[in-house]
Image (tube, coloured by chain):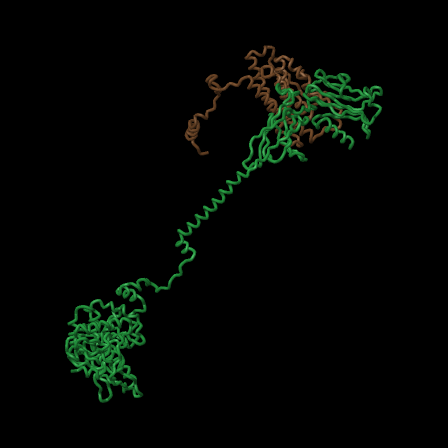
Chain colours: A brown, B green
Amino acid sequence: FGLSLPAVAVLLVALLCLDPHCRVGSAPICAHGPSGCHIPSLADLFDRVIQHSARMHSLSNDLHSEFEQYFLPSKNHIGKIYRKCHTSNILTPNGKDNAQKLAREELTEVILKLLMAWRDPLFQLHQSMAHQQDFNSFSSNKALEMGDMAHELRKGVEKVAEKMRVLGMLGNSVTGLSAAEAMLPLSDSGEAMSDYELLYCFRRDSNKVQNYLKILKCRIVPEHDC
Amino acid sequence: MAAQKQRRERTAGELGTRGAQLQRTELTMNPSRGPHFTGCRSREQETFRCWWSAGTFQNLTEPGALRVFYQTKNALSEWQECPDYTRTVENECYFNKTYTQIWTSYCVQLRSVPQNITYDEACFTVENIVHPDPPIGLNWTLLNVSRSGLHFDVLVRWAPPPSADVQMGWMSLVYQVHYRVRNASHWEMLDLETGTQQSIYGLYTDKEYEVRVRCKMQAFDNFGEFSNSIIVHVAQIPSKESMFPTTLVLIFGVIGVVILLVLLIFSQQQRLMVIFLPPIPAPKIKGIDPELLKNGKLDQLHSLLSSQDMYKPDFYHEDPWVEFIQLDLDDPAEKNESSDTQHLLGLSRSGSSHFLNFKSDNDSGRASCYDPEIPNPKDLASLLPGHSGRGDNHPLVSRSSSSIPDLGVQKTSGVEETPIQTQPAVPSWVNMDFYAQVSDFTPAGGVVLSPGQLNSSPVKKKGEGNEKKIQFQLLSDGAYTSENTARLLSAGVPPSPGPEQGYQAFPTQAVEGNLWNGEYLVSANDSQTPCLVPEAPPAPILPPVSDYTVVQEVDAQHSLLLNPPSSQPAICPHSPNKHLPVIPTMPMGYLTPDLLGNLNP
């Protein structure tokens, strides 16, 4: 460029000064207090989170169906119905009554554990699907989206837990889920789980998360005949 | 392979779709079916049931022969027997809430305990075998009916099955509505609906419809049973009344349009006629307005016509009979070579030596010119019918140079030619002299032409008044002996107003186009002159007037044979006075020498 230094400086100043609103800065959304903007209530937060989990579960179901449609498990797998997922170690209530009987803190913790446990495996799943040429790009994109959704859902549930803690609904028994429990998705035999197994397991777990959240909301936010 | 495939398909059909993951293993491949599970279902995701059949094995139909064992695969647990064999229903095993674990793999086996044979096994997870109960409370309400009355829309409502816990969200259900025309074979399916109501559009009013609904768990594939069908029917409203105003409006609209068109045509008739039937252009002379020809002024027409080629003055040069004779009043003795007489004689001279000798005179050839004092000579221009006198009547077109009244005086001296000269546009033919008066015969047979003598005094005396009158008096210059002149000759009395009237008669007659056909009868005061109405004794004629002689024929020797005048003059058709004596027949317009002789006192 033949631009001289003063010209560049002038250009920069002009760009900066042209639109002062373009300056990016971090400002709190509701800086002016409760009247400034609408703070979502706990019920709203729960609704959002539940919607999110429903979408995530739907995605996992679609992926699983696709996988099963194109890659029927071989006959060898017939006998091996029982697939031990890596999250099987986590004690989860297996029914509505059990989940309702569980304490809120524990239920919340279970949810967070589950979501946390799937962070890395979903990433792996996406990587694995993207590399394979059998899957079309649409499926691999779904896997990526699923991973992102799981991540966002976890963040959302953490926010909800924080809110509940603030509101005094949760005791302090909820430990910090720093969760160094980085569980590697290992099958019984110790080898890495296949994509199909991962999908099968995640489909199950996403349904768990969705239902747990609904039960939790019903208990936290009293609604009609909950 | 085929059997295994069949087995798998049966599994999918009976126990749910592939997603049910109910995989069966048959230990025996028996074509005739042995005992087997017919299905396992959960209604609300809290309990489930399994059914089996003994198949063709008749010996195992008694209850208790076959037993169901299950195993949950959470942890390695032993096979347990069915917790509850339903008493009311045959071959059903019921797992209540206590024994139902969601998200847990189950395997059930059908065994015959005495023989320790496992006839069938099925593995599943409960959430994959959930088939919700049908919705309840299906009803419909009419949304609207189309304007034509042929279609209508309904809103269908239902309630979720009471067994499903949708309020807490334990089961999130989606619904599917079917409808069809009653007793039709094909059901119309609408999209999945998460709510408990749905609209159906575009139904026909005169048809009965069946509507039913079913539901399934969201993100799962197993639909429940259909609800009971309801009948939707809307009677068609007879819409004859709605048609009536429409037809009326149509009819009135058409009539209005027709009336408008007729009015339009009648109001714009002229324009339409011009557009559709353009007028044929009438022939016209290029550059000349036909209206002007009809009604225009003489001078306008003269200017117009002069601009045309056909009225070039050169036109007349071609005609030897038409000449422009210059009259020099200052020098009456000057000869004009181009006089009529000369031409007349010139022709004959070229032809034969026997022709009339022309006694050239100083004044011969002198033509009276167009008198500029003559007021409005152009009026006579309109009298000229173009150049119609080409054939019979040679219009004398000559240049005017002098005044006629003076001419008369001058010409009394000698033989003079006083042909009247006029401009082309002012064909004062009344002043023209085509003929030279023969005054005398030479012994050699030649004809001596003498200029007409005219006493212009009568003209002057009558100077006022009618122009045509004056011009007619000019007629008597030289060639013609006008009535007045004849009068003068005979009686030497100034002409009275009487003959003037007679003269007035002449112009009118002349206008009609008969220039030389005997209109100008020079009459004497006596009755011998035809077509004269002299009511007074004729004026005394001052000098003797030269005579006219009609050239009857030309004999073989190229000599003119002149007719003696007859004593019977022709009767002037226009003579108002009947008492006029009949003049011996002769060509009209000529005064024979005899007559003239009689006129002379």
Residue farthest to the front?
B579
Q: Nearer the viewer, residue B126 or A85?
A: B126
Q: Tell me if residue B245 comes above or below residue A171 in the rendering.
A: below
Q: Residue furthest top?
A: A172
Q: Is residue B147 visible?
A: yes
Looking at the image, residue B444 lies above or below residue B338 = below
Residue B360 in view here: no
In the rendered view of the protein, which quadrant contains the C terminus of chain A?
top right
Disc tally is 0
- Name the side, left or right, on which B362 lies relative to B391: left
The residue positioned 75% from the left and 27% from the top of the image is: A76
Residue A72 screen position, x and y as percent: 71, 29
Q: Determine the image quadrant of residue B340.
A: bottom left
Asked if residue B452 lies left or right of residue A109, the reply is left
Q: Position of residue B299 (x, y in %)?
A: 26, 65
Q: Is residue B208 left or right of residue B81?
A: left
Relative to A201, say whether B566 is above or below. Answer: below
State which quadrant residue B272 falls in.
Answer: bottom left
x then y, percent, for residue B287: 33, 63
Q: Is residue B35 left or right of residue B426?
A: right
Relative height, residue B274 to residue A105 (above, below): below
Residue A212, horizontal then vertical, whole percent:
63, 18
Q: Nearer the viewer, residue B214 or B362?
A: B214
Front residue of B193/B503: it is B503
Q: Quadrant of residue B369?
A: bottom left
Which residue is the extreme one toward the bottom?
B443
